[in-house]
Amino acid sequence: EVQDEEESDPDDPMHLNKAVKHTVYFYYDQYALTSNGFATIDQIIQKLKDNPKLFVHLKGHTDQSGSEQYNAPLSKKRSQMVFDYMNSRGVSAERMILSSYGKKKPAVQNEDPNTAWMNRRCEMVLFEK
């Protein structure tokens, strides 16, 4: 039986109403936003401004190299960077959920150097409350 709590579990936001995921990627060991990142986030900001019912869950991740002790704060800095930028562009903190996972939830398993970039990311899941 599915419980109500599961429906609104922010860690599985794809369960949520009208959930759509967008992703921005980061350079190795970096949390600065790239020009592609800014362009993607600007689109999300516009969607949030157009629809006051929308919220966004920011989920920071790292690749598999390095220790979890190192990666946990790095993934937090990545989601925080997106949060701060969106906030500076008029998205209120109340509409954002901030999470970070270090290297615990890779997008690609058994990464090689050619695919590692896919794990250095912040996922932004738009959903309606």
Image (cartoon, rainbow, N blue to C red):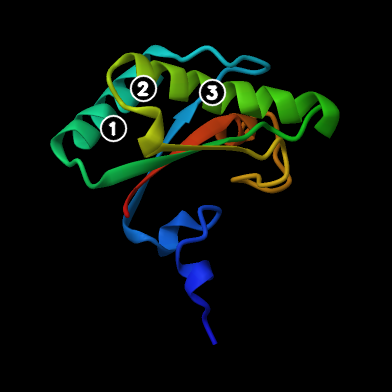
Residue type, mark 1 in image: Ile
The residue closer to the viewer here, 90 or 124, is: 90
In the picture of the structure, the residue carrying the numbered disc 3 is 80
* Relative to 17, residue 124 above or below: above
Q: Is residue 36 visible?
A: no
Q: Does dot 2 land on a helix, a strand or a loop? A: helix
- Checking the image for residue 88, the label placed there is none
Chain-order first, disc 1 or disc 3: 1
**Mark 1 touches mark 3? (CB < 8 Å):** no
The residue closer to the viewer here, 14 or 9, is: 9
Q: Residue 129: x percent and y percent?
A: 32, 55
Looking at the image, residue 52 sits to the left or right of residue 75; the answer is left
Q: Residue 116: x percent and y percent?
A: 64, 32
- Checking the image for residue 86, the label placed there is 2
Q: Quadrant of residue 14?
A: bottom left
Q: Does dot 3 land on a helix, a strand or a loop? A: helix
Residue drawn at 45 percent across, 18 percent down = 84
Residue type, mark 3 in image: Gln
Chain-order first, disc 3 or disc 2: 3
* Relative to 91, residue 50 above or below: below
Q: Residue 43: x percent and y percent?
A: 24, 29
Q: Quadrant of residue 31?
A: top right
Query: Which residue of the protein is positioned furthest toward the front in this rendering?
Result: 94
Q: How far apart, in angstroms, are the residues tagged by discs 1 and 3?
A: 16 Å
In the picture of the structure, the residue carrying the numbered disc 1 is 44
The quadrant of the image that shows the N terminus is bottom right
* Relative to 4, residue 116 above or below: above
Q: Residue 30: x percent and y percent?
A: 62, 14
**Mark 2 touches mark 1? (CB < 8 Å):** yes
